Image: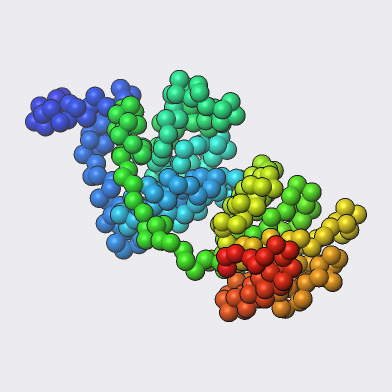
Amino acid sequence: MLLFPIIVLCGSKIISRLSCMTAKLNPVRLLARLFKPREEHRIHHESAKTKPTVGLLSSSDTASITYLLRPYLSKLGQRGVIIDTETGVAEDGLPATYNCVVIVRYLPSEWVQPLQEFRASGGRVIYFMDDDLMDPLALKNLPASYEKKIRKFAVHQRTKLESICDEFWVSTQYLAEKYYKWRPTLLLPGASIGDIAVEGNMCSICYHGTASHKAELEWLVSIFSSVQRGNDETRVEVFGDHQVNRMYRQIPRVAVLHPMSWPSYLAYTSAIKHDIGLAPLLPDPFNAARGPTKFFDFARMGAVGIYSNVAPYRDFIQDGVDGILLPNEPELWVETILDLSLDTQRRQRMRAAARERAQSMTWDGPLKGV
């Protein structure tokens, strides 16, 4: 038979590769796969002309995407773009602009058919794993909810993944050895200059409302979304629980901190600095009794405060001098925040005025720090 002399001529290398093949392959398909050019080289040569786009199927950007996938794709001359699994599958499936899709960790069931159709049309599908997601024994010490998620989107999807994917990528030597039957590619970590640079020009914005400010936290979602789209050099910090984290998790460069005791908050805000502090107050019977103490928190952090033009701030803040008063109109807040984020001199001037005024109101001596 034709297959036998080829195996003899090619020697142990072919025999080794045959051991990795499934018994279901017929001789023609087997030979085609054995002598197929290395995919890495094929992609690289194409990228020199077209710079193709690779879809990264993931619910969000992750550390592994930043430090493993993007560096590897960059080496191949490709650009990775997130396909957000949280938004659902588009009616027309995967865009034709993708030459390849990488499934990052998890495979939601609704994406199986679109990926099968994508592969049938000539696209390549790759699975990337950065934790031991396929061994149920490795999950036994994880929190129950996390284990359930991994079982649903990884362990229980293994058969489908192995049938859909052309290639497998892993993040560590341990995974490469444990899942050797996949013949996986081991990705080495790397970073872009921007990933490790100290962002000295970033403008830091904070909203430090407590649990009683649920309405304000919801009101600020659209404002922060617009601000973060309007200026790539702003970052946001808010306090909140898991519900708040879910509200803000899709907005870029937002950190949600767990609430803390007053002594811990006082120590924390004495050690960090922000550029802009927000203090919106929406109409509410409980808000009617609030005081203007946020002014002192902002002065301590070196932040210029933007306040709702209502009591208690209306008669306390000197508008345009040691703070800014605004009506509760989201568009105006977005415009003001963006303008202030780009005006370093104005922030310095107003911050100094707020600091001076706060110092004039101390009862035990001058303020320390900036």
Say which quarter of the image contains residue 298.
Answer: bottom right
Q: Is residue 351 left or right of residue 111?
A: right
Give the quarter of the figure containing the N terminus. top left
Q: Is residue 72 visible?
A: yes
Please name whichever residue, 213 or 250, is drawn nearer the observer in this view of the structure.
Answer: 213
Please name whichever residue, 273 or 140, is drawn nearer the observer in this view of the structure.
Answer: 273
User: In the image, is residue 285 above or below residue 154?
Assistant: below
The picture places residue 280, in percent across and down from the top left corner, at: 76, 62
The picture places residue 18, in percent across and down from the top left corner, at: 22, 27
The residue under the point 28% across, 46% down is 39
The residue under the point 64% across, 72% down is 351
Please name whichever residue, 128 or 278, is drawn nearer the observer in this view of the structure.
Answer: 278
User: In the image, is residue 93 above or below residue 321?
Assistant: above
Q: How is the image coloured?
A: rainbow
Give the quarter of the figure containing the C terminus. bottom right
Please name whichever residue, 32 or 86, is drawn nearer the observer in this view of the structure.
Answer: 86
